[in-house]
């Protein structure tokens, strides 16, 4: 990454945020802080761009590990931002109880639905709180996205969940580049170098995907550098998830 000028990139992101906020008369930002590097880096960038008093972090546990909330607090404490804890475990459980009225489904049958329900509930929570704090503070809060370029390329996000946000700061940066930005902004090391996982399936991201983030970054730059098996896995993930990016819309006369 010799050609990656982290100082320049950080300054450009800050300028991008400030320009957008000024042009649209916006006030603050709210984001889910998972305890992982991506949300920590986005929080750090937002603090640089908007000031710590205009950034609100939210932990949204749902049958989650306590470690994630502890790591999220380490991030909020370091950057001095407000951190809200909004536990949606009971909401998730109530949803599951209502599902029983449709039939008796096995855990295997509902596994994928359950995994994706959590980020969808979290998205609704963030937008509710953004609207609430916009009213309370008299200025508009946006929901910030936290997906990086590698995740997006292979469609590693939930439709209607973490894919929904108002502003995106790191979606054009690979995992390695995000880490470089995090190092520059002094994200707590325990968070920055933690093995990424979705906090939902008890698997690391790379275990769940079946490919390494570094390989995805290499593929996007020059896929010939990877062996055939890895290339095909990445290509399959990318093609199978293209539907997440576009909504086919019929137009009269088509």
Image: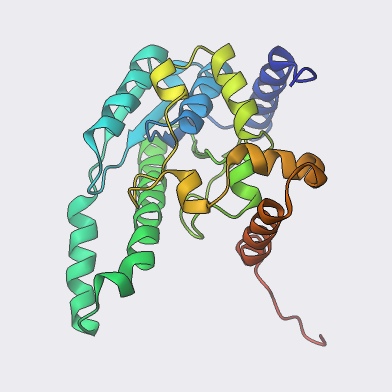
In percent of width and height, residue 232 lies at: 69, 59
Residue 138 to residue 254: above or below: above
Task: Choose between 35 and 247: the one closer to the eye.
Answer: 35
Task: Choose between 192 and 59: the one closer to the eye.
Answer: 192
In percent of width and height, residue 75 lies at: 38, 20
In percent of width and height, residue 23 lies at: 69, 31
Q: Residue at x 65, y 34 (%)?
A: 174
Assign the N terminus to one quadrant of the image: top right
Residue 194 to residue 155: above or below: above
Q: Residue at x 81, y 85 (%)?
A: 254
In percent of width and height, residue 196 lies at: 45, 37
Which of the 4 image quarters holds residue 7? top right
Side of 227 where 84 appears, left or right = left
Q: Residue at x 52, y 52 (%)?
A: 209
The answer to whether one can see residue 218 in this image is: yes
The answer to whether one can see residue 171 in this image is: no
């Amino acid at each position: 990454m010799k050609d990656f000028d982290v100082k320049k990139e950080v300054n450009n992101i800050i300028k991008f945020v400030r320009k957008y906020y000024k042009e649209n008369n916006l006030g603050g930002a709210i984001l889910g802080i998972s305890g992982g590097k991506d949300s920590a880096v986005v929080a750090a960038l937002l603090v640089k761009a908007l000031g710590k008093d205009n950034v609100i972090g939210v932990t949204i546990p749902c049958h989650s590990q306590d470690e994630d909330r502890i790591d999220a607090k380490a991030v909020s404490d370091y950057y001095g931002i407000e951190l809200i804890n909004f536990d949606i475990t009971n909401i998730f459980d109530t949803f599951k109880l209502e599902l029983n009225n449709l039939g008796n489904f096995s855990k295997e049958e509902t596994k994928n639905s359950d995994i994706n329900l959590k980020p969808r509930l979290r998205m609704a929570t963030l937008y509710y709180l953004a609207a609430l704090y916009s009213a309370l503070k008299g200025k508009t809060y946006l929901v910030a996205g936290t997906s990086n370029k590698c995740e997006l390329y292979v469609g590693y996000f939930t439709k209607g969940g973490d894919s929904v946000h108002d502003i995106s700061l790191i979606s054009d940066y690979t995992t390695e580049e995000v880490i470089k930005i995090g190092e520059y902004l002094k994200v707590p090391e325990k968070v920055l170098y933690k093995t990424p996982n979705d906090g939902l399936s008890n698997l690391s991201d790379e275990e769940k995907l079946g490919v390494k983030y570094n390989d995805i970054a290499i593929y996007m730059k020059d896929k010939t550098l990877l062996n055939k098996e890895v290339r095909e896995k990445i290509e399959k993930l990318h093609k199978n998830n293209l539907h997440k990016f576009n909504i086919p819309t019929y137009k009269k006369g088509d």
